[in-house]
Amino acid sequence: MHLHRYRLLASLLLCKLFTFSALAQQPPYDKAPEARPPYYRVRYEASEQPGELIFPVSYTVWIPPAVDRIRGLVVHQHGCGEGSCRSGQTGAFDLHWQALASRHGCALLAPVYEQPDGSNCQMWCDPRNGSADVFKQALHDLGRMSGHAELASAPWAMWGHSGGGHWVGGISLLYPERTIAAWLRSGVPLVQPEEDQSIRPYQIDEHVLQVPLMCNLGTREGVTQTTGRFAAVWGKNQEFFKTLRRRGGLVGIAIDPLSSHDCGNQRYLAIPWLDACMSARLPAEAGEPLRQMPQAETVIIPWTAGTDRFSQPTPPTQAKNAEGLSIWLPDQKIATAWQHYTRDTKVPDTTPPPHPRGVQMIQGHLTWQTEADLESGIAHFEIHHLDRQIAVWPAESTNRFGRPVFQGLQYSDTPSMPLVPMRFRVPAELQSARAEEFRVIAVNTVGLRSTDEVSQ
């Protein structure tokens, strides 16, 4: 109790020291949700020194309140351009990604690079251009702010979209000993020389081959639609995949059959895939080295070269072309989910979501807390008074790129702004009702309801 109180007081003092720079931010980067514990934020100005980061950047981290010592860090990295950068401001507030982090005693971090439209995205999405150094500095500073100094040395499970895929892939290649696993949506780092010599290819260290990596893209990014702005994505993914897989790297490919460069329904495979990798690789004690993936559970999916056709999952000892053209997956459960995702993105789920708790009536508003369903997130809540359902909240869940979700989703897989609260205005005729007369039921994105018990 005394340690928790000390951490809270220290964090409040440090928040005052580190958040003053937010006052200097200019639109559209001054609209981020407020960062109060368990959220913490730091921001750094652009540097004019050669080799250092040329864009301002902020980092928001969410710390699971019940965790005494952080075991790792889940990083959610937006893509290139002002719109994607702006959408990253809500990344740390995503309930679904928080559920993944919380399950493993990890924090959730969302960087926001303040890149103006028309500027060179490589100046941040290539971590060798200064963004890796600022990222590591942020972990030190956020560790001091939050009272979790172990953030500075914790390992990383990473997700990135487009330029963010370049970034998390590059970080994985540069720091394989710190990388638990990385999901690369619609963007991969360069591993072979190109005519454009301004982009340096990465060298593949032997340690990289032990890091689970997933290449994920939409079918209209060069697979079934071979012209247009994103047509080159499929070729880049194949090049990255083949280069590492032929050397035995733990690399997979998952093609979204419905989408283009947007993120679609990928989180319903990405989060379980990262969950499987984190379960296997995180050590029992925080601070110990990462464990290797258990190869006995591996599933290999043979791939027909030059096409998007895949065979049925097979054990690694039975797979043809296992070292060259085969998809690596961590276990049979993920292989089954992969089959559903690559067919129609309808990854199944048979477990109900966590039940909401802490229902209160405050000035005519019903409030509650809950965690998201790890497999399927939250679509909406049902509000019941006694034996009667009186509302669905929100009345209409939104997501124009995939399954409707409670918080809404933007192009780069982050909640819509402003954040949808867990707060419902009770109808006038029920304003005098007591909180215990109400029940709140969570409904996940496959329609499963939380267990129907009285909220406490």
Image (cartoon, rainbow, N blue to C red):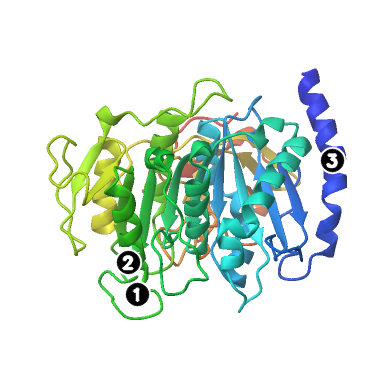
The x and y percentages for residue 431 are 70, 47
Please say if 28 is above or below 381: below
Q: Is residue 188 left or right of residue 330?
A: right
Q: Which residue is mark 3?
A: 14
At horizontal 82% and vertical 51% (from top left) the residue drawn is 19
Q: Nearer the viewer, residue 219 or 400?
A: 219
Residue 139 lies in quadrant:
top right
- Amino acid at dot 1: Ala
Tell me where residue 366 appears, x and y as whole percent.
65, 44
Quickly name the residue at label 2.
234
Of helix, strand and loop, which one carries label 1? Answer: loop
* Residue toward you, 86 or 301: 301
Q: What percent of the width, then of the height, locates residue 218?
A: 34, 65
Seen in the image, is 31 located left or right of residue 325? right
Circle 3: residue type: Leu
Counting residues from the N terminus, which is met first, the one under dot 3 or under dot 1?
3
Q: CA distance from mark 2 to mark 3?
A: 45 Å
Crowdedness near tag 2: few (<14), some (14–19) or many (≥20) residues, C-alpha within 10 Å: many
Mark 2: which amino acid?
Answer: Trp
